[in-house]
Image: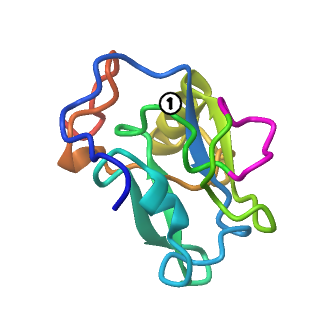
Amino acid sequence: MWTKQMLAQRKRDPKTIAVIEPDKCFGAFACSICQVACPVAGCIVEVPDQDGRMVCAVRADLCIGCGLCVALGNPTAPQKRDFGCPADYDAIDMVPFNEVVQALESAESGALETETPVKGVANEWADSPGPAGTTNPTT
């Protein structure tokens, strides 16, 4: 792997984090380029979508907001790079961190009548500490 894996907890909340649109994701087992590009161990995971197809999802509690997974040419990408989600899929956008956390908390509390408006964010806080500055809703 060409990226260094970050194993320590992040020091502060990022301004933006990656969010994967499952309907645009080619599939976790067929592509996984975003997982290779990500410097954080376990940040991008495989989860089943509403049709049972395995797609990639970003763990909000681990993403550092580097944008290395975002498609080349995507306007939300924070910097230029040579690798990322294939441009013909462009399944990943950088979304403000606070919006993602609010959407996840609303979905968990049942405040949203439909599924979370920010799709593709795996909320697996039960196995790791919650994002810096937030409480873990499972504890």
Where is residue 126 shown, x and y percent of the image?
23, 47
| Mark 1 surroundings within 10 Å by alpha-carbon count, few (fewer than 14), some (14 through 19), many (20 or more) | some
In-image side of 54 versus 127 (left or right)? right
Q: Please determine whether, in this image, residue 30 is positioned above or below residue 136.
A: below
Q: Nearer the viewer, residue 26 or 49?
A: 26
The rendered magenta stretch, by its main secondary structure, is classed as loop
Where is residue 4 shown, x and y percent of the image?
30, 46
Q: Is residue 92 magenta?
A: no
Q: Please determine whether, in this image, residue 131 is positioned above or below residue 87.
A: above
**Residue shown at the point (55%, 26%) measured from the top left:** 97
Residue wearing tag 1: 101
Q: Please determine whether, in this image, residue 55 is positioned above or below residue 133.
A: below
Rendered image quadrant of residue 18: top right
Q: Nearer the viewer, residue 12 or 124?
A: 12
Rendered image quadrant of residue 103: top right
**Residue shown at the point (47%, 22%) measured from the top left:** 14
Where is residue 57 shown, x and y percent of the image?
50, 58
What is the basis of the colouring in this image? rainbow
Q: Which portion, as a residue range, is magenta?
A: 71-79
Q: How many marks?
A: 1
In-image side of 100 versus 131 (left or right)? right
Rendered image quadrant of residue 85: bottom right
